Image (tube, rainbow, N blue to C red):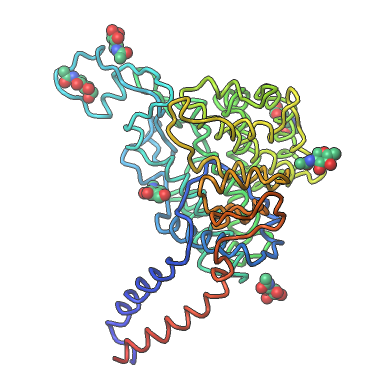
Amino acid sequence: MLISDPFPCVVFTLCTILSFSCSARATNPFTQYAVDFPDPNAIVGGKFPANLGGAEATIISWAEQMASFGPWTVTSKPVVAPSRDKHDYMSWAPYQWPNCSNVHNTTVLDLADTWKECNYYFLDGQVNPDRNSIQDFQSFFNLSDAVLYNSIAATLQNESSSIYSQNVVKFINTWFLDADTAMNPNLNYAQMNGGPGGQTGEYMGILDLRGFAKIASGILILRKTGNTDWTSDIDNQFIAWCTKYMNWLETTPTAHTAATAGNNHGTIFVNQLAGVKLIAKDTEGAVNWTQNYFTGIFLGQLAANGDQPTEASRTHPWHYRNFNIAGMITNARLLKYADPTSNPWNATAKGATIQTTVNFLRNTDPSKTGETAITAEIYPNIAAIASVYGDPTGKYAKFMNDAMFPYADDATFLWDQPLAGGDTSGGSGPDASVPKGGKSAGMRSLAVEPLWFTSFIVLALGLYLV
Ligand SMILES: *[C@@H]1O[C@H](CO)[C@@H](O)[C@H](O)[C@H]1NC(C)=O
Ligand SMILES: *[C@@H]1O[C@H](CO)[C@@H](O)[C@H](O)[C@H]1NC(C)=O
Ligand SMILES: *[C@@H]1O[C@H](CO)[C@@H](O)[C@H](O)[C@H]1NC(C)=O
Ligand SMILES: *[C@@H]1O[C@H](CO)[C@@H](O)[C@H](O)[C@H]1NC(C)=O
Ligand SMILES: *[C@@H]1O[C@H](CO)[C@@H](O)[C@H](O)[C@H]1NC(C)=O
Ligand SMILES: *[C@@H]1O[C@H](CO)[C@@H](O)[C@H](O)[C@H]1NC(C)=O
């Protein structure tokens, strides 16, 4: 046999070297954006112009990075929920802190005892690091990004089967479907409070699974492209899971509290439920809930000047305004997708639209509320608004350029195009109607892949022969 033992080792080393040089193509560093729903039709039907090469390379890179952490399962956590069922999802409330003066302990308590015995109190915006001792929430965030970016990456390959869609199948199967590792379709133990009697989930924990909007986009993309890795068998199993979970979301009192909350919890509940409904093929239900959001909760969320009173009162108002805007944009995208005749982007509350609240945020200085800097969370919000409402005066492009954010290389540029001149090279001037793309975007297109793959084979063989 020609291929002897050291060969896989050689290949591995070369892969490492080559993927290193490959990642030297400009791609943006991974950012875990809060929530989004890239329109599956736009992704599938996309004839992407060359200036999107940077965004495409970033998506491939993020797909691979996120896949490297998977697969994920709720059954791997070191503790089990009070139900004693290891298939139950569980997380701890982030802003709850223990006060053990009621316990009169003489030595330090371990986390499990602290959590059961000490009284807990709420400190808004201050995350108790104990939360990280259970990673189900972070696993689901990563799973959601892995599914979204791998589904898009699979589509960019334009092949009916690829490592990217195989990743999606593996991740969905492990988290939701495989009998050994599946999550039960409930959030009975999400964001549990600590303390005596606090061993059940809170309504605020529902938003732990907001990533369902991203997952829905990914799965719809695979369905629409007729991807052969996403078989009708796995599709049917996932529909069955989502149907049960949808029922939990629509009938459980904690979920009802989330659904009727006037702040970001209400917005993001709808992101999640509508996403689940689209996977479960309940398009009518997705339209109903997103439409009701815009004729209900949304109306109470905006002031005439575009501020958001329910978020402005929080300890990190700049962050929470951003977060809720991402939820508004996601609801608009879900509704527009589920009912193309709808017009959520024109929905008004006290005369303000989603654009008005983004403009308000754009002119808000985070340092005024002790939030030190403009962070990446605002960029997709600005870009989405520029892509929907246009950027005739170039103010959104200027914002990005001033922030030195290489927008055209960001994953979201694929569905938030065309943001005029959204790159750091500047000089696009106001009113530029054609997006410029990254500085060398064309060179980053996927067309280079076969070339480096060929050189990889040649090098691999060369090294082997030496
Ligand atoms: C902890 O609880 C004690 C007793 O109820 C109370 O006096 C004290 O103020 C609490 N400390 C904090 C930080 O809440
Ligand atoms: C009691 O346990 C808590 C939680 O571990 C700890 O913060 C506290 O210091 C302990 N008290 C004493 C006297 O060790
Ligand atoms: C999630 O992804 C981040 C990188 O963004 C990584 O640091 C973290 O370890 C991952 N966690 C899990 C549970 O996958
Ligand atoms: C994708 O593949 C199909 C079928 O092989 C082909 O007709 C189509 O032109 C390809 N599209 C792109 C953008 O390469
Ligand atoms: C429509 O959505 C509302 C919440 O916005 C919900 O209360 C109602 O049950 C839904 N109706 C149907 C038929 O799903
Ligand atoms: C808002 O409505 C007007 C009139 O129907 C329409 O021309 C415009 O395109 C809409 N704007 C958006 C962003 O959908």
Q: Residue at x 70, y 30 (%)?
A: 293
Q: Quadrant of the N terminus?
A: bottom left
Q: Residue furthest left?
A: 106
Is residue 387 visible to the viewer in this orientation of the structure? yes
Q: Is residue 72 above or below residue 277?
A: below
Q: Residue at x 38, y 41 (%)?
A: 135
Q: Residue at x 31, y 23 (%)?
A: 116
Left or right of residue 386, residue 82 in this image: left
Q: Residue at x 40, y 31 (%)?
A: 83
Q: Position of residue 195 (x, y in %)?
A: 34, 19
Question: Quarter of the image holding residue 262?
Answer: top right
Question: Quarter of the image holding residue 165?
Answer: bottom right
Q: Nearer the viewer, residue 361 or 12?
A: 361
Q: Position of residue 285 (x, y in %)?
A: 72, 38
Q: Is residue 313 above or below residue 322?
A: above
Q: Position of residue 77 (x, y in %)?
A: 35, 42
Q: Quadrant of the C terminus?
A: bottom left
Question: Quarter of the image holding residue 252?
Answer: top right
Q: Position of residue 458 (x, y in %)?
A: 42, 87
Is residue 237 visible to the viewer in this orientation of the structure? no
Q: Is residue 203 above or below residue 281?
A: above
Q: Nearer the viewer, residue 75 or 432?
A: 432
Q: How many marks?
A: 0
Q: Nearer the viewer, residue 2 or 333?
A: 333
